[in-house]
Image (cartoon, grey):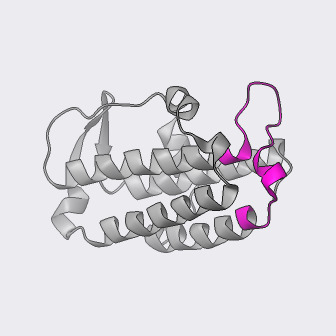
Amino acid sequence: MFQAYVDRVPDGDVLARLRSQAEESEAMFSALTEEQGDHAYAEGKWSVKRLLQHLVDAERMFCYRAMCVARGDTNDLPGFDENAYAEQDGSDSRPLTDVLAEFLAVRAATIALFEGFDGTAWTRSGTANGASITVRALPWLIAGHELHHVAILHERYGIG
């Protein structure tokens, strides 16, 4: 699954890609109304706000993993159940503008985190959720995960 996310990202500077994605997402989500933010394309599916909050939560988790591995942590890092997190995320009671502001803040912190890693940190590997990961792969994973969900917004929600 994770390789499919990485494969979505065009070659080039991945941190520049994360910056441009933040700008694109800000433009897309800020153009939506609150009603559109509350929309889910089918019964039992996430609302647009919940999908955006999922991007925030997943990015935080990926960055936590990157920080741990970059700092030499050798413990197997835990996975997370995205649906259980989504049920408890509180996005339903928040304005879309607040969730978007959180996304942009997390993205800025993500870029700062990766910019702070030295060359050795980028080469470290570890284990998360029972699978091998590398620091170098994680920003690509973040970018690809967002591309995956933006495609869903286009295809299933009619946004963008």
Q: Nearer the viewer, residue 157 or 85?
A: 85
- Tell me: residue 66, above or below residue 106: above
Residue occupying the point 58% across, 68% down: 22
Q: Nearer the viewer, residue 52 or 97?
A: 97
Span highlighted in magenta in the image: 29-49
Q: In this image, 141 relative to 25: left or right? A: left
Q: Nearer the viewer, residue 92 or 42?
A: 92
Residue occupying the point 82% across, 45% down: 157
Residue 48, horizontal then vertical, whole percent: 72, 46
Q: Nearer the viewer, residue 147 or 113?
A: 113
Q: Main secondary structure of the magenta part?
A: loop
- Tell me: residue 158, above or below residue 19: above
Residue occupying the point 49% across, 74% down: 16
Q: In this image, 32 relative to 52: left or right? A: right
Residue 98, horizontal then vertical, whole percent: 60, 59
- Residue 50 visible? The answer is no
Kindly give the residue lying farthest to the right in the view shown.
158
User: Does the magenta portion include 157?
Assistant: no
Q: Quadrant of the C terminus?
A: bottom right
> For residue 78, what is the image quadrant?
top left
Residue 76, horizontal then vertical, whole percent: 22, 32
Residue 15, horizontal then vertical, whole percent: 44, 70
- Tell me: residue 87, above or below residue 146: above
> For residue 156, what is the image quadrant?
top right
- Residue 114 visible? The answer is yes
Q: In this image, 9 relative to 78: left or right? A: right
Labels in figure, total: 0
